[in-house]
Image: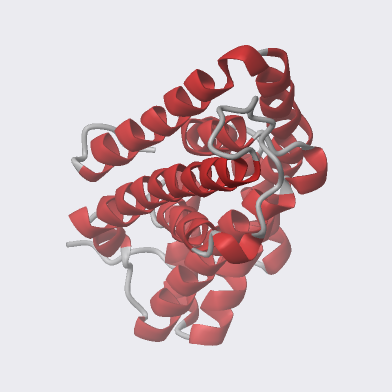
């Protein structure tokens, strides 16, 4: 086997590489996973951070750890991230988020029924305290990490450059730089566009709010299952 040619990249170079990736393919890959979450919760622009913060933190952590491992070992870890366990992480996290949304709705309905003496009130989807749904942020974090661990051409270049450094710290810097670039544009797109669309959709279709939420959660469950089974690759 021919030895791999060393690849040297600066922090600014991987940042630009991440921006290029985040401005196109990343948005498409994230939409089937995050879109249903925004639709199910109805969280608008002001509360979009509750979804995007843990998800983006998971992606940044995943990219940084990949770079650190590559730099520390001086090896290409591409084979590791192509292993089945990576899709299990993303698929399992997606299912966890779906189940946490079901639990969130169940608690909301119990609260409404207790306030209205068991009647069936019109559901207005009030904000739910983050303390009552601790599984949702952790599930979103793992979902983001799972997205980061899926191989793509720009990430492969960053991993190769990290392995070339022979340093965990330098590799982590490269991975984090790529992650920052890859996260910035999707965060803007989802916080300003998808979150607003999801909120408006739920408000305008409030008569079918339960059905819309059920469909969104069902889509998340399907995405989690087909991802874990390896039938689709994000």
Quarter-wise, where is residue 229 in the image?
top left
Using residue 23 as the reference point, say whether residue 67 is left or right of it.
left
Q: Position of residue 71 (x, y in %)?
A: 44, 79
- Identify which residue, 234 or 79, lies in the foreground: 234
Q: Residue furthest right?
A: 46
Write the residue at 33% across / 68% down. 76
- Identify which residue, 1 or 129, lies in the foreground: 129
Whether 62 is drawn above or below 148: the answer is below
Q: Position of residue 160 (x, y in %)?
A: 43, 64
Quadrant in the picture for the N terminus: bottom left
Write the residue at 60% across / 60% down. 54
Whether 82 is drawn above or below 25: the answer is below
Using residue 126 as the reference point, say whether residue 26 is left or right of it.
left
- Identify which residue, 58 or 182, lies in the foreground: 58
Whether 174 is drawn above or below 133: the answer is below
Q: Position of residue 88 (x, y in %)?
A: 26, 53
Q: Position of residue 172 (x, y in %)?
A: 55, 76
- Identify which residue, 166 or 35, lies in the foreground: 35
Using residue 55 as the reference point, say whether residue 126 is left or right of it.
right
Write the residue at 53% across / 37% down. 118
């Amino acid at each position: 086997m021919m030895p791999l040619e060393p690849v040297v990249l600066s922090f600014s170079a991987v940042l630009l590489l991440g921006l290029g990736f985040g401005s196109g393919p990343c948005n498409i890959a994230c939409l089937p996973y995050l879109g249903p979450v925004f639709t199910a919760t109805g969280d608008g622009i002001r509360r979009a951070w509750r979804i995007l913060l843990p998800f983006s933190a998971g992606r940044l952590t995943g990219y940084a750890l990949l770079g650190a491992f590559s730099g520390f070992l001086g090896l290409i870890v591409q084979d590791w991230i192509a292993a089945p366990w990576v899709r299990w992480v993303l698929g399992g996290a997606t299912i966890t988020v779906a189940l946490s949304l079901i639990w969130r709705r169940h608690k909301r309905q119990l609260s409404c029924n207790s306030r209205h003496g068991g009647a069936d009130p019109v559901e207005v989807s009030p904000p739910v305290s983050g303390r009552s749904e601790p599984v949702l942020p952790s599930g979103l974090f793992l979902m983001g990490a799972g997205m980061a661990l899926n191989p793509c051409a720009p990430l492969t270049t960053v991993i190769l450059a990290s392995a070339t450094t022979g340093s965990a710290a330098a590799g982590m810097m490269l991975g984090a730089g790529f992650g920052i670039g890859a996260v910035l544009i999707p965060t803007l797109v989802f916080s300003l566009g998808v979150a607003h669309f999801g909120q408006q959709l739920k408000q305008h279709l409030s008569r079918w709010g339960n059905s819309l939420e059920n469909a969104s959660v069902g889509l998340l469950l399907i995405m989690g299952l087909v991802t874990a089974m390896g039938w689709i690759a994000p």
